[in-house]
Image (cartoon, rainbow, N blue to C red):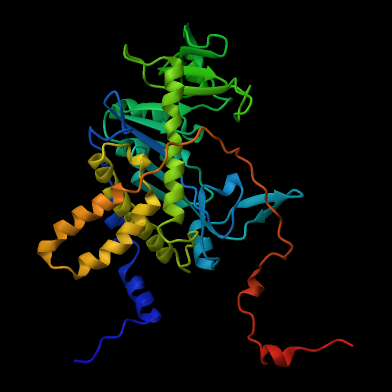
């Protein structure tokens, strides 16, 4: 029997085209779900499962500005540009398109395990606000969902009430509330103010006082000069209004785990492939296949880490993700070649090995949200640059020494 040769690149590309864009998203939907159990450290607060919603921060061809950190760059082709669009800015009053088509990805993540429970892909120029209500429908009942200020809105609060999901989220300074009453908080009365307010869908409803929702509002600042945001006003809104509602200071601390989704995004974009993620497909279908192919691979790694943490009774966030990736890479070829009756033994050994990758306690440190970006000296790529004629001579033959 002759040896079988692996398929060539053209055959793989043709197979992906025949498969279409639905296969990988269906695989992700079948595997994506919260996995924390009651004994999982750092995954619950008073029986409520911690979840977070935010746009993904993929690192792409180079480190980009904070405004671009929530999007994924695609290969610059007319098909990708037509499907996903380009970012647009203005220079000297004239609109200027960006260099690459962009995909915007919004995730619903379990903060205690970093598992992605849902992902929504849309055009890069679209805001993530319209999908906030859809994400709340995907969150399990009695969850505590944390989100950034871009997702705040009346419709989102209505969805939270219908789903019996609790929400704690940032509110922009321009958000308007009708104050009901101010509540006392004995922690830092000079620096923190909590109260109840009414949220209305429209300005006319606010004037007529109709269709209002009661929400909790907290305004606070930082008295540590070394922390970003020192002296600035920050606002949180929450649906936690019952008798078991924690103090205002405790709610601010409860909101802080939202940053776990940013750590998960970094794990997702960098470590599984040992490189910054590039979506290299030249078609929209191929780009979606690549993106939804990365998500199940990330979920496969994160699936084993909570069990490994439980075996040593520690928080899953103290397990090293990079160590788990290396263990899986070493074990999967062995499991593929092993007989079926040995798989359970190999899996148990793999989980014990993952449990050994312990991280030290996190330092009390911060990273300012700033960027140092150098503008490119090269001219902008235009349509006439796509099909450049090939050189007719070799590099050496083309060299001419100037006299």
The answer to whether any part of residue 154 appears in the image is no
The answer to whether any part of residue 226 appears in the image is yes
Q: In this view, does 17 lie to the left or right of 198?
A: left
**Which quarter of the rendered picture does the C terminus lie within?**
bottom right
Residue drawn at the location 55% of the way across and 28% of the way down: 172
Q: Is residue 306 above or below residue 49?
A: below
Q: Position of residue 214 (x, y in %)?
A: 40, 16
Residue drawn at the location 24% of the way across and 51% of the way down: 351
The residue closer to the viewer here, 264 or 355, is 355
Q: Is residue 30 above or below residue 364?
A: below
Q: Position of residue 133 (x, y in %)?
A: 38, 35
Q: In this view, does 330 lie above or below 72?
A: below
The residue closer to the viewer here, 221 or 315, is 315
Q: Which residue lies furthest to the right in this view?
A: 403
**Which quarter of the rendered picture does the N terminus lie within?**
bottom left
Residue drawn at the location 52% of the way across and 54% of the way down: 59
Q: Where is residue 146 in the image (x, y as percent from the top left)?
A: 41, 32
Residue drawn at the location 35% of the way across and 71% of the way down: 16
Can you tell which quarter of the image residue 345 is in?
A: bottom left
The residue closer to the viewer here, 309 or 115, is 309
Q: Is residue 28 above or below residue 150?
A: below
Can you tell which quarter of the image residue 378 is in?
A: bottom right
Q: Position of residue 330 (x, y in %)?
A: 30, 63
Q: Which residue lies furthest to the left in this view?
A: 341
The residue closer to the viewer here, 48 or 284, is 48
**Count the marks: how many?**
0
């Amino acid at each position: 029997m002759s040896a079988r040769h692996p398929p060539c690149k053209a055959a793989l590309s043709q197979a992906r085209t025949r498969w279409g864009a639905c296969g990988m998203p269906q695989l992700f939907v079948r595997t994506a779900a919260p996995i924390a159990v009651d004994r999982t450290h750092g995954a619950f607060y008073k029986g409520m499962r911690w979840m977070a919603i935010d746009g993904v921060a993929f690192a792409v061809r180079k480190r980009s500005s904070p405004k671009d950190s929530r999007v994924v760059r695609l290969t610059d082709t007319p098909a990708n540009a037509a499907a996903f669009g380009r970012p647009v800015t203005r220079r000297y009053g004239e609109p200027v398109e960006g260099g690459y088509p962009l995909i915007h990805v919004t995730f619903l993540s379990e903060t205690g395990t970093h598992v992605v429970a849902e992902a929504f892909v849309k055009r890069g120029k679209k805001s993530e606000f319209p999908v906030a209500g859809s994400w709340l429908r995907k969150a399990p009942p009695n969850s505590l969902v944390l989100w950034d200020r871009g997702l705040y809105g009346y419709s989102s609060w209505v969805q939270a009430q219908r789903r019996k999901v609790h929400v704690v989220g940032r509110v922009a300074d321009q958000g308007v509330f009708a104050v009901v009453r101010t509540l006392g908080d004995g922690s830092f009365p000079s620096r923190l103010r909590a109260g109840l307010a009414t949220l209305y869908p429209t300005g006319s409803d606010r004037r007529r006082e109709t269709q209002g929702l009661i929400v909790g509002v907290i305004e606070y600042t930082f008295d540590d000069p070394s922390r970003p945001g020192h002296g600035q006003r920050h606002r949180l809104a929450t649906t936690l209004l019952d008798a078991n509602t924690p103090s205002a200071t405790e709610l601010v601390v409860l909101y802080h785990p939202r940053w776990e989704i940013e750590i998960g995004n970094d794990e997702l974009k960098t470590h599984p492939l040992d490189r910054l993620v590039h979506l290299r497909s030249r078609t929209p279908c191929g780009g979606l296949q690549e993106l939804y192919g990365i998500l199940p691979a990330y979920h496969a790694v994160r699936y084993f880490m909570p069990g490994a943490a439980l075996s040593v009774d520690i928080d899953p966030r103290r397990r090293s993700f990079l160590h788990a990736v290396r263990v899986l890479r070493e074990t999967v070829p062995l499991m593929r070649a092993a007989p079926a009756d040995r798989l359970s033994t190999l899996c148990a050994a793999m989980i014990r090995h993952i449990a050994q990758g312990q991280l030290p306690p996190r330092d009390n440190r911060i990273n300012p949200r700033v960027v140092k970006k150098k503008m490119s000296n090269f001219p902008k790529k235009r349509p006439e640059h796509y099909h450049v004629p090939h050189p007719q001579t070799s590099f050496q033959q083309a060299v001419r020494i100037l006299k």
